[in-house]
Amino acid sequence: MAVPALKIEHLGKTFGATTAVDDLSLDIAPGEIFGLLGPNGAGKSTTINMITGVTRIGSGKVSVFGYDNRGNSLITRRLIGVMHQEIVIDHFFTVNQAIRIHAGYYGLRDDPQWRRTLIERLGLVPHLDKPLRELSGGMKRRFMIAKAMIHKPRLLILDEPTAGVDIELRRSLWEFVQEINNAGTTVLLTTHYLEEAERMCGRIAIMNQGKLIALERKETLLNRLGGRRITVTLTEEPPQALPESLLENGCLLSREKNRLTFFLAGNCTTGDILRRFHDSGLRIADIDLHKPDLEEVFLQLTGRGKVNRSGERS
Amino acid sequence: MTNPLPLPPFEPWIPFLTLLKREIMRFMRVSFQTLLAPVITASLYLFVFGATLGQRISVLEGFSYAQFVIPGLILMGIINNSFSNTSSSLFMSRYLGNIVDLLVSPITPAQIILAYTVAAMLRGMLVGAVITLIALGFAPLPWLHPFLCLLMALLSSFLFAQFGIIAAIHANNFDSLSMFTNFLLLPLIYFGGVFYPVSILPPFWEGVSRCNPLFYLIDGFRFALLGTGDNPFWLSFGAAALLAAALFIWAGLLIATGYRLRN
């Protein structure tokens, strides 16, 4: 069995009376892109800060590629690259100087080739000699990714990497992260953009109020919790009292004139629904299948907006 | 379970050298503020006490007032700038949040404290050297014990570099950081015998002054330069060395435990 890139065991942290992280355990395999989601205040950043050593561990244990991050902190820090959520820059230096300084903190001699690759790939070439304070918000984010990558970490932690950046940059960052991952770097990603998690991550953990409330492969999570929905449009409006067979298992979500929407989960399949319509003599004009999205799952799990039976978020 | 992955290449002294270089680049980048301003301040003192007022004052037999005051002014420049370098740099890193760059990287607490200290000492000694050169234009100096002069200057800058680290970590905001300067450092300097020999004070105030650690630094430095002081050199050096060791341990503990740096 391969050593996990990251192993978190019963991690906990309290700040005064507030429990920020509560008995969190999870493993991330080498080569994964792992998503850590949760609403604001869920404990994601505190977890990341405990992994990287910015915050002291309250209880539990964190290992990075088999090295304990307290007993072997100098080793684990070499293995981790982190891009923090807040934009953190050193106002005294230019982009190029700051990147070189950061490489030095990791005990590396300057590697001009790798530095150039990062700078070019992240579109920082025109800004190389600019003081950091003169960069736009998006450029600062690119710089922070370059900084996190300059020592070629085995585990790259991206805490809200695309917060507040335009869609073009977001997509180019996604591509870059994918490339890095293809080259063997494990990625732990937290994001508020569920589209980002859905597109990038293989497995997803969801935290709420410090606790882990879900950890699944993305597809499993979507199927298990989101289910699929099917909207059937009939050739004419059905009678007010629908045939009993269509109401079985309580899978009817909503009706609107001749449009009926069903929730497909558990035993209720597309075939079942179509058979029930056939048996009841109602004629189908059109069907529309909706795949669940992560946002829906997220909202259900965190209770931030349950999907009710009428198909609307409360 | 298989063995952990082999580690990436790492040269353990590079983080220290990098932080040292960063600190030097930082103060050189704002050299008007960090190097030129203190030299101008000291030059004004030298003008007032050397070329004008000093002609009418004599506090130490056999020496002009300018000769008496110059060692204190040199040391004042060294102390102020060593303190300012560590306190402002570390506090700004805390304030702006870029201290996390150090907290997440494999630089040891010893390397952090040494890099900050060496850079602060370098700035302090640079300012001290320039003030010394300017002072030579106002009065000749005997330089009786040049090695001891250097020793006391280095010890003073080391001591106040540690004090700057401690202040930067304990300060909650810019206001409280300036309190360290205005309500602690400046009174210690001015009551430490820069402008007068402590021995001319009434006994009570002389006793109070002898509790001021700056008194031992200034007196020791003056002894090394002029060959006369209120204390034997070993007492001044010993007191200063003890205080420097205590502050080094204090600063070291703060950095090593991550006090107010790590949550």
Image (cartoon, grey):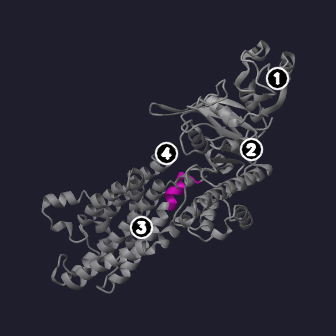
Of all chains, the one bearing label 4 is: B
Residue B108 part of the magenta-drawn span: yes
Apparent side of residue A102 relative to residue A120 in the rendered image (left or right): left
Of all chains, the one bearing label 2 is: A
Q: Of discs 3 and 4, which sits in the foreground?
A: 4
SS class of the residue under badge 4?
A: helix
Q: Are marks 3 and 2 in contact (CB under 8 Å)?
A: no
**Can you see residue B146?**
no
Q: Earlier in the sequence, mark 3 or mark 4?
A: 3
SS class of the residue under badge 3?
A: helix
Task: Tell me how far mark 3 sits from mark 4, CA to CA.
Answer: 27 Å
SS class of the residue under badge 2?
A: helix
**Residue type of the residue flagged with mark 3:** Leu
Q: Is residue B245 above or below residue A21?
A: below
Nearest the viewer among A21 and A163 is A163
**Residue type of the residue flagged with mark 4:** Thr
Residue at the spot of label 1:
A269
Residue at the spot of label 3:
B154
SS class of the residue under badge 1?
A: loop
Percent x, y of residue A58 = 53, 34
Which numbered dot is residue A199?
2
Q: Is residue B33 above or below residue B261?
A: below
- Graded by Cα atoms within 10 Å as few (under 14), some (14 to 19) or many (20 or more), the crowding at tag 1 reads some
Q: Are marks 3 and 1 in contact (CB under 8 Å)?
A: no
Which quarter of the picture shows residue A217? top right
Q: Is residue A118 above or below residue A212?
A: below
Percent x, y of residue A17 = 45, 30
Residue at the spot of label 4:
B257
Which residue shows up at 66% across the image and 25% down it? A310
**Residue type of the residue flagged with mark 1:** Thr
Q: Which residues are magenta?
A: B107-115
Task: Tell me how far mark 1 sits from mark 2, CA to CA.
Answer: 26 Å
